[in-house]
Amino acid sequence: MSDATATDSDSSSAHPQATAQSAVPSRIRPILLQLYRAGILLAICWQVREHHVHLRIEGDAPMELAEAQRFLTNAASLKADHSPLAGLRVFDKDGVEIGYAVRTMPAASHIIGYAGTTDTLVVLGADGGVLGMNIRSSEDTRSHAEDVMLDWSFKKIWNGKVWAEVAEMDVKREGIEGVSGATMTSMAVAHGIVHRFALSQGRMAIQPVRWDMTDIGLAGAVLMGIWLTFSRQAGRGRARRWFQIFVLGYIGLVTGDLIAQSLLAGWARSAIAWRMAPGLALLFFASFLVPWVSRRPLYCQQLCPHGVAQEWILRVVPNRWHIGLPDGVHRGLLRLPALLLGLVVLVILLPVDFDLAGIEPFDAYVIGSAGVATAVVAVVGLIASVFVPKAYCRYGCPTGALLEFVRSHGAQDHIGTRDWMAGLILALVVAIKSNYPLVQYWIYGF
Ligand code: SF4
């Protein structure tokens, strides 16, 4: 793969760029470029993560500052909390954290009162104690919800209690009685609050790091791949061939743990699952860090089963079967991986139902789990490799393009098309994130 995308980026080495960069000492320029590329990727991931944390916390009814100001009159801003509590931190105008706000929906969407669900806001003070609660919206009978809000003794039940006390409340044992005339609605509100607090409390349990045989096997594969990458090729041919059999059989068919856009998108939205899948996380870090610091494409050269499959096809197919693509087609196809990366970013951010596994062949290695699109991409890519050496790597792989983006090109490195495109993608991500309600309106009309 690296040969194709490298050609792409190298082709952008126009003289004006070199001239523009001549002011930067040539020894420092490659370092600055690598920092820029890592920074862009981290910034995109950070923005994607922020976006999804907001969506998870605020859902379809974002909390507004005025709601917090009912209890914290000097509240000036809200900031999403990435911790498992998943609420909003409240700050005053000097940036001092003065409280915390949390809503019960969508966590309590299964708790139905008389005729529907109720979304309740609970605000805590700087000392961690509850200051008060308020019904934000209710699908329940309107008069019942109004009765609950008029019952001051019910509304004060949680006041002064800290998070753990609310989470551990037993509504029945505590003798919490519903509001007269709105018993079911008020009890649903009470259960919703306790459930919301208890849920976050439970999620705060530290997940243990789980190393199993799969992780140990992956870690061994990463170490072997690094050794092959940095050892001299002469005399390593046999070891590499055996290792490729292992990569195809173990990483591909046994574990199915391949670096793919669907995996990276999930991790960007949530977090890297290093506790649950430490071997896969190690594969991920090594695949990005080794080319970033050393110019060596570790994953594409040693660890990708689909790359191995195409390399074997290249070995067994006679050269006379190979066809040369017209220059225009070749140059056009070189853009495809970058376009797919743009598509991936849009899918991650927008409210669209699109399975990213379908744009890559990697799920096809997990027998029985591949969708039709994945299987088609896998088969077509391998057939194409019969006639065009490593066709999928060169013209179709967004993951390969991403790994190529971070790969250092040494002293001759320069700002190329990929760097400008990455900057544009970051700007697009920021624009979508900042105007998300508008974007959502354009797509769904509401
Ligand atoms: S299929 Fe993609 S990730 Fe695998 S070797 Fe080719 S370019 Fe790299």
Image: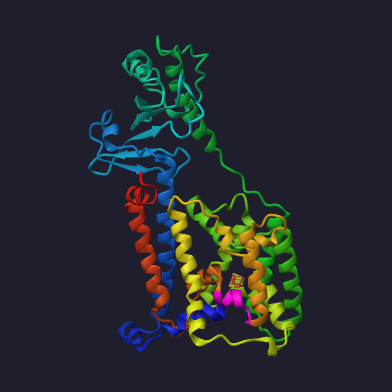
Residue 376 in picture, x, y percent from top left: 64, 65
Horizontal side of residue 298 vs 214, given as left or right: left
Q: Residue at x 43, y 53 (%)?
A: 350
Towards the viewer: 374 or 197: 374
Q: Quadrant of the N terminus?
A: bottom right
Residues 105 and 72: in front is 105
Magenta span dominant secondary structure: helix
Q: Residue at x 44, y 52 (%)?
A: 49
The residue that appears at 74% across and 82% down in the rendered structure is: 316
Q: Quadrant of ligand 1?
A: bottom right
Say whether residue 390 is magenta.
yes
Read off the magenta span: 388-395
Q: How many marks?
A: 0
Q: Is residue 384 above or below residue 43?
A: below
Q: Position of residue 395 (x, y in %)?
A: 55, 76
- Asked if 159 appears above or below 208 in the picture, the reply is above
